[in-house]
């Protein structure tokens, strides 16, 4: 057995082996998987815009006018009018002076953190932050202080210990595996009082919380005041890519220092065109955000009626913590057999012993199908021993 085969077998033995599933068709509330229709409850297409006709049309028109690809990095020849227009649109939506597009949320987080903190400084990161933030801290070569999840007292202690070395506090706005919201106001106050910048990743918050879906920073009344807001175009905005909103001086520094921006081909015109159209729809149809919130509440309530706890979730991300990886995947596969596609999440995405079935709701789901899905999952959970079977 080769070393690669041995490593793969070890993953199988631990219940951590992963495989690709093939979805046939666009990301709607239901999809065809393995030749049959299933209810899709693990997509980040929160507002149903990835398959919206206007968004599709905008992508097609951008490809016809500007081409399929940008051809180079923005600092060489890949800087096009659609990039500037979308950056202006995003900055205005988020309440900032400027914005800068990146190739993905991963690139935006790693590039921004590494550009703003360096050797001899300290970055403060919530223990449940996304992997891209964790890797950004590593790449920065700054010391990283990982504070307990949402624990402002622990963060305050760390900031006091760092003194003048405190450079950056960074947190998810909505935590991607738990569905809870960061204490943005408290983070802002602490960062301000200790002379550190604050960066909030709104990947799962944009289009989902705050006034008009503007995110957790706007929900806290701090639009334009938090130093940096990072977001993605590939979730509620239905396209691909990411952005950073900040003051003009900070954006200028990122243009000159963020390696993923400098050394990556610019976003393709179709992706930019689609995101711009999706953002216009979000602004003109805020009822999509309200529908998403209502659907999330419906699913949480329906799962609770089945005896399934959703813990801290207050958003469209609704996890059921199972614990062991193998039992989690047993439930995932049984639910899928019953027509509910919700993905099992295992280490290293979540800590050891906290594997979970993670539901993500869309505004385009119907309340009745969400309630039906909860009943199906409840029955499946009892069958695999997640919930004791009544005598």
Image (spheres, helix red, strand yellow):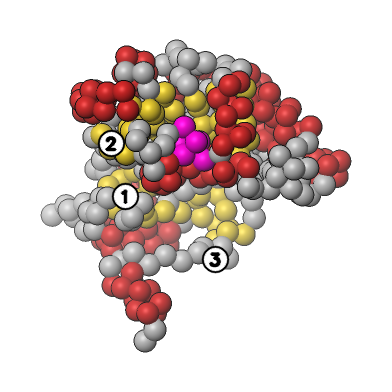
Answer above or below: position of 15 versus 99. Answer: below
Which secondary structure lies at badge 2? strand
Q: Which residues are magenta?
A: 111-116
**Which disc is residue 34 wearing?**
3
Which corner quadrant of the image does residue 130 belong to? top left
Percent of width and height locating residue 111 = 52, 40
- Apparent side of residue 128 relative to residue 113 in the rendered image (left or right): left
Location of the C terminus (image quadrant): bottom left
Q: Earlier in the sequence, mark 2 or mark 1?
A: 2
Residue closer to the observer: 96 or 35 = 96
Q: Which residue is mark 2?
A: 145
Q: Quadrant of residue 266?
A: top right
User: In terms of depth relative to the viewer, which is nearer, 284 or 214?
Assistant: 214
Residue at image coords 67%, 28%: 87
| Rendering coords of residue 86 (x, y %) | 70, 29
Specify the principal SS of the magenta part.
helix
Kindly check if marks 2 and 3 are in contact, taking CB atoms under 8 A apart as contact. no
Local crowd at mark 2 within 10 Å, few (<14), some, or many (≥20)?
some
Q: Secondary structure at mark 1?
A: loop
Q: What residue sits right under mark 1 in the picture?
A: 350
Earlier residue among tags 2 and 3: 3
Q: Residue furthest front?
A: 120
Tell me if I can see residue 53 in this picture: no
Q: Is residue 277 above or below residue 94?
A: below
Kindly report which numbered mark, 2 or 1, lies closer to the viewer in this rendering.
2
């Amino acid at each position: 057995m080769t070393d690669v085969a041995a490593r793969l077998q070890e993953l199988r033995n631990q219940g951590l082996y992963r495989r690709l599933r093939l979805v046939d068709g666009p990301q709607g509330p239901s999809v065809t998987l393995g030749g049959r229709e299933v209810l899709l409850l693990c997509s980040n297409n929160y507002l149903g815009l990835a398959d919206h006709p206007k968004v599709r049309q905008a992508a097609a028109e951008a490809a016809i006018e500007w081409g399929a690809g940008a051809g180079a990095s923005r600092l060489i020849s890949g800087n096009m009018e659609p990039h500037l227009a979308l950056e202006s649109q995003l900055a205005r939506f988020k309440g900032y002076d400027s914005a800068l597009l990146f190739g993905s949320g991963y690139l935006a987080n790693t590039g921004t953190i590494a550009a703003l903190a360096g050797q001899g400084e300290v970055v403060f990161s919530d223990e449940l932050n996304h992997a891209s933030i964790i890797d950004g801290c590593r790449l920065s070569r700054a010391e990283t202080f990982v504070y307990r999840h949402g624990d402002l007292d622990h963060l305050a202690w760390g900031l006091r210990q760092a003194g003048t070395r405190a450079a950056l506090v960074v947190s998810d706005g909505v935590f991607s595996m738990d569905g809870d919201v960061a204490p943005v106001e408290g983070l802002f106050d602490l960062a301000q009082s200790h002379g550190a910048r604050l960066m909030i990743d709104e990947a799962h918050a944009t289009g989902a919380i705050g006034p008009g879906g503007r995110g957790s920073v706007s929900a806290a009344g701090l639009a334009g005041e938090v130093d940096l807001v990072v977001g993605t175009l590939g979730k509620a905005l239905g396209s691909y890519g990411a952005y950073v909103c900040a003051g003009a001086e900070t954006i200028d520094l990122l243009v000159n220092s963020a390696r993923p921006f400098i050394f990556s081909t610019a976003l393709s015109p179709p992706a930019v065109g689609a995101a711009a159209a999706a953002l216009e729809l979000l602004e003109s149809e805020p009822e999509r955000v309200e529908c998403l919130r209502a659907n999330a509440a419906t699913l949480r309530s329906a799962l609770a009626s089945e005896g399934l706890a959703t813990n801290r979730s207050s958003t469209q991300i609704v996890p059921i913590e199972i614990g062991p990886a193998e039992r989690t995947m047993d439930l995932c596969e049984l639910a899928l057999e019953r027509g509910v596609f919700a993905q099992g999440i295992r280490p290293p995405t979540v800590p050891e012993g906290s594997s979970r079935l993670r539901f993500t709701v869309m505004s385009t789901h119907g309340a009745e199908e969400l309630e039906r899905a909860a009943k199906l999952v409840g029955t499946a959970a009892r069958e695999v021993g997640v919930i004791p079977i009544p005598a």
